[in-house]
Image (tube, coloured by chain):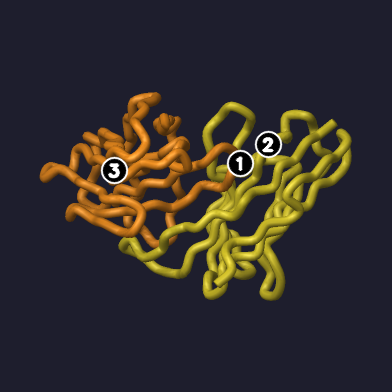
Amino acid sequence: DAKTTQPPSMDCAEGRAANLPCNHSTISGNEYVYWYRQIHSQGPQYIIHGLKNNETNEMASLIITEDRKSSTLILPHATLRDTAVYYCIVRVAKANSKLTFGKGITLSVRP
Amino acid sequence: NAGVMQNPRHLVRRRGQEARLRCSPMKGHSHVYWYRQLPEEGLKFMVYLQKENIIDESGMPKERFSAEFPKEGPSILRIQQVVRGDSAAYFCASSPRGRGGTDTQYFGPGTRLTVL
């Protein structure tokens, strides 16, 4: 699986959009970009994934650049409960392949 | 639709004892994965199982650790003769059968193992 690079931390104000970047310059054509988050010591929570098109669900939006070398997870209106470690994971589109977690980015939402 | 269930949530063992961690996948999911998170470290894949089959155990320590997913009942991660270094959070995830982005893994709340 391709490696991802994320800044170690960032913060944003409550109610504002949080834009979390991720670099995956060695991504292959058959690899998906997945985002999970881990709030405190809870189990990782699935957020969203995509291959090459931008994706949106009730939690977030995922913007993937045209060359697929980077992506941005957008939380449109961050709340204090969004404070967590966010993991950007590149995963080969092989059936039921494992997830390889990096260090993630710690998002702190301030009041 | 209940999520992935794990029990116990907290488990305390003394060195040399056995630890058994259980995971019930989401309804309709036939694939189970175990991950371990050591203190202040990231999550590491351990093993991937389907019913009655171990598919990928590349992340399992070679000794003392075993996993099963029987035809009936939950998946079990078993750690024999625990040592202090086994203290960690153990997370189970499940997914449906699929490929091409349709086999998203959903995680349980974890079991926190403390070895005294």
What amino acid is at disc 3?
A: Leu
Q: Are marks 2 and 3 in contact (CB under 8 Å)?
A: no
Q: Check disc 3: other Cα within 10 Å, few if <14, some if 14-19, many if 20+.
A: many
Q: Secondary structure at mark 1?
A: strand
Q: Secondary structure at mark 2?
A: strand
Q: Is residue B99 left or right of residue A23?
A: right
Q: Which chain is yellow?
A: B
Q: Which mark is residue A73?
A: 3
Cα–Cα gap, marks 1 and 3? 25 Å
| Chain letter for mark 3 | A
The image quarter containing residue A50 is bottom left
Q: Which residue is mark 1?
A: B36
Q: Is residue A69 left or right of residue B49?
A: left
Q: Which chain is orange?
A: A
What amino acid is at disc 1?
A: Arg
Q: Check disc 2: other Cα within 10 Å, few if <14, some if 14-19, many if 20+.
A: some
Which mark is nearer the camera, 1 or 3? 3
**Spot occupied by residue B11 in the image (x, y as percentages of width and height):** 79, 45
Cα–Cα gap, marks 1 and 2? 7 Å
Residue closer to the observer: B55 or A55:
A55
What amino acid is at disc 2?
A: Ala
Q: Secondary structure at mark 3?
A: strand
Image quadrant occupied by the N terminus of chain B: bottom right
| Chain letter for mark 2 | B
Q: Which residue is mark 2?
A: B88
Q: Which label's residue is closer to the chain start, 1 or 2?
A: 1
Say whether mark 2 and mark 1 are on the same chain: yes
Say whether mark 3 and mark 1 are on the same chain: no
